[in-house]
Image (cartoon, rainbow, N blue to C red):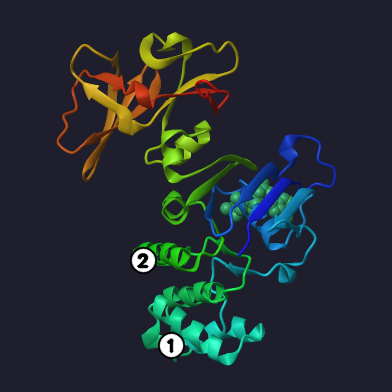
Amino acid sequence: MASITLENLGHSYYPNPQTPADFALKELDYEWEDGGAYALLGPSGCGKTTLLNIISGLLVPSRGHIKFDGQDVTHLQPEERNIAQVFQFPVIYDTMTVRQNLAFPLMNRKVPQDEITKRVTEMIEVLDLSEKADRKARGLTADEKQKISLGRGLVRYDVNAILFDEPLTVIDPHMKWQLRTKLKELHRQLGHTMIYVTHDQTEALTFADKVVVMYEGEVVQIGTPEELFDQPAHTFVGYFIGSPGMNVLPCEIKGKTASIGNAKVDLVNGYNLTDGQIELGIRPEFVSLSSGKKGVSAQIEAVENIGRFKIVRANLEGHSVNAVLREGEPVPTDPKLQFDASRINIYQDSHLVRVGG
Ligand code: ATP
């Protein structure tokens, strides 16, 4: 296992990049801890695969360096980096048994036979494949084949890191949850440095200790699931994480009051923001509806029942605001919206304004 340092790392697929938009990966400076579980999360085209390929060695970055445990590996070939990779689709040998497939990466590295037997047996148990251990991979289901793929990555104990590129894409929805939990458990047991690429927030948030959120080639936040929920560093993070995402409302701020059109919202802190686009962010979970006098007037546009919760969409001064209400909570016909002031975040040009910072 190793720590992974990304030093002034950036990549453009163009020979002479001129503007920031020419970079598929904008400059990034970060150290990923030895033994950490990280998820790279973001929509299609945001640069996840570009970053993963730089880590695995399939791509040489046009800027900066990558280091494993302090050693510069920027120009090393993938096979010289000692990493394991698990892809979207199973990469296994159909004519081999489950056991043989799992043993293969270890045999290639000339691991002693008794050690191979021990590790393969353990991995078969961990993956719940004991009943199929001596069956040829050919006859197994897509889920089972992908489990073998995961096992082939995890069976090696000497790797610097294990990289997962959307590994649960082919898995049945009901099995995804099981495998996600299994991966998390394996991370705790084995302590490998793991990097998991996905565009699915549930996968990222359940797997990772730290989630790296990417947007248009930029890492916009690296944080724990709680940090991403409570204090999104960028409006995109607020919108992308959560269901529905954070409400983002253009506003003007004077002291401790935000004005959204004619509606006035109290803030906990005072701000002195004179330029840029100012927005107020509040998660739907912290918006409540009342029929009293307090709060700002809004018109209900839609109510969606999703089991234990209701999502109410209201119109506030021409802007859509979502509120999450618990089952049984009434929806007033002429409601006032109340924002929990302690949960409001303020953004300037899409970036969080940190109070006192
Ligand atoms: P997805 O989830 O769809 O795989 P991603 O987040 O992994 O997307 P990348 O594949 O890293 O994103 O792509 C980032 C940007 O770089 C995109 O605009 C893409 O079009 C561009 N890009 C990727 N590969 C190449 C290439 N070989 N040549 C030129 N541009 C590329």
Cα–Cα span, label 2 and label 1? 19 Å
Q: Is disc 2 surrounded by few (<14), some (14 to 19) or many (20+) residues within 10 Å? A: few
**Disc ID at residue 335:** none
Q: Residue at x 35, y 21 (%)?
A: 341
Relative horizontal placement of residue 156, taking residue 330 as reference (left or right): right
According to the image, label 1 marks what residue? 133
Q: From what the image shows, is residue 251 above or below residue 347?
A: above
Chain-order first, disc 2 or disc 1? 1
Res. 260 in view: no
**Disc ID at residue 178:** 2
- What x and y, as percent, mark residue 316? 35, 19
Q: Residue at x 44, y 92 (%)?
A: 134
Circles 2 and 1, Cβ within 8 Å, touching? The answer is no
- What x and y, as percent, mark residue 318? 40, 18
Q: In front here: 254 or 17? A: 254
Q: Residue at x 42, y 78 (%)?
A: 141
